[in-house]
Image: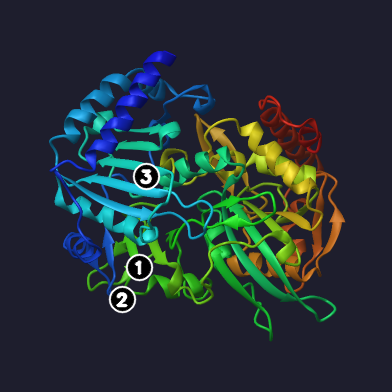
Amino acid sequence: MSTLGCEDVLDEVRSAVEALSSQPNVSRPDTKELRRTAENFGTATVWGNYNFASTVKNRSAGLTVYVGGPEVSQPQLNLKQKEILEKVPETVEAVHKYMKKAPFVCVERTMGDNDEFTPHCILFVSVHRKEMMRLAYMINQTLFEPKDGRNPNLYLVYIPEWQEKDRQILVFPEIGVTYVLGSDYYGEAKKGFLRMAMWYAKQIGMLGLHAGSKIVRVRDNGGKIRRYGMLIFGLTATGKTTHTCHNHGLIEDGEGIEILQDDIVFLKKDGSALGTERGFYLKTEGLDPQTQPIIYGAATKPDAVFENVMIEYGGKANFDDEILTGNGRGIIQRSDLACSTESINLPPIDGVDGLKILFITRRNTIVPIVSKLTQEQAAATFMLGESIESSGSDPARAGEPVHEVGANPFIIGDQAFEGNWFYDFLRNHSNVECYLLNTGGVGEINETINGNRVIKRKALRPEIPETATIIRGILKGNIEWENCSYSNSLVAAKVDGINMEKFDPARFYHDEQLNALAKKLKEERIEWLKRFVGLNPAIIDSVK
């Protein structure tokens, strides 16, 4: 699409969404009507909340395109994305004709709770099928009540009944509009608004992070209570929400946690991070009252909402049953979490005793269970975004290694800019410590047979309580660190309460295998980082 053609399309889209608000085919049900209508199409649980089943069970990442000027272009497009992009003008024309005919509901909400940056989020959902009212109800449960005078305006238009063969998500970042065509998966709405907000936040000097945030109070080795801010990065299914909403055994007098956010925050240069949502959208796989009591407690409240969870006869929720999908989801209310506070915003670094940043990955061979990072290594870890693919974005590739800058699939624009911003932030604050946690495990052996990845030996994976104990050790400052010969970083030699020797890769591989895996990992990392033009060379050098 030419620049001129693109400008014309943006003008048309902007005019169409602004006009939609006042069309006679758009209704504005209140919260009670939204809930009442949605629940008519759901399944009640024993807790009095409801589960809804979507036709599409995950985000359509491979069918999502960004439309606009060079600043929003995507670095790589698959063949289907290229085809979608070429047909944008005619698709937009068809969408706008449909928007004038179909019945829609409109819900307006506010993202965030602060005096600086609170986007006004306007959702339109086609209710050609009345059951789609649940999408409006779910956004209502995720964002805050609308407030006057908030900006920018962000629009998202859902047309779930769009032809399946033409399913696509069109994102127009520069005008704050997203069209979701042919999908009824709620994650498109949640991430659609957040994606656009992160783009706008970057334009005014902040960095949108795919990270949870919390405040912890911990007694150090000298007996003094310290108050730290925390940011926890991680792709879907790595444990980001789990450990954002975990107390890590901080139960001594004066200790505790304050849960702020579980997904997206806007980081400022002073270290404060503005929150976005009142409802947390979690992956329900393996949700258990013993290992995740805080989350489980909120999930049993009447205001929780489930999506694609197996609800058995009688209303029992079976979080281990993946017969519908491996990507069962739930929205829990932050106010129902036992350790939430009124504010959703992380204070500046000078308002706490320091900031602890945790990157959570899932790798299965030789990545240490926990590493302490230098500033350069932390910036490299941010850029590498190492993990494995989950059923939340691409079920066909679930389990495969993946790189996602910032553990954030929703970055729009120059990714090297974000890495350099983050590196400069670390260099400007001496009281920020960074760590890498591996919730995948060590010791896996796999090989490719006839093009298929076959696992010959599964990795030894740390359990949730073990990772929580490691985090407690980081906070208390009582982990003993040692140099790792193959990872070029400090790794934990001793952690109170855990036998770290069982996670030593040398127990699973002989020297030749270990060296080969380390060499391959280093080469992959260097190759990945070198693709980012303008990235500070110190970041790349840290992995050599």
Picture coordinates of residue 263, whole percent (x, y): 51, 55
| Of the two numbered discs 2 and 3 in the rendering, the one whose residue sits closer to the viewer | 3
Residue for badge 1: 304
Q: Do the residues labelled 2 and 1 touch (CB within 8 Å)?
A: yes
From mark 2 to mark 3, how far is it between C-alphas? 27 Å
Picture coordinates of residue 156, whole percent (x, y): 33, 42
Amino acid type, residue under disc 1 in the picture: Ala
Q: Residue at left 25%, top 56%?
A: 134
Mark sitting earlier along the chain (2/1): 2
Mark sitting earlier along the chain (2/3): 2
- Nearer the observer, 314 or 530: 530
Amino acid type, residue under disc 2 in the picture: Trp
Q: Residue at left 41%, top 45%?
A: 193
- Nearer the observer, 88 or 360: 88
Residue for badge 2: 47
- Which structural element holds mark 2? loop
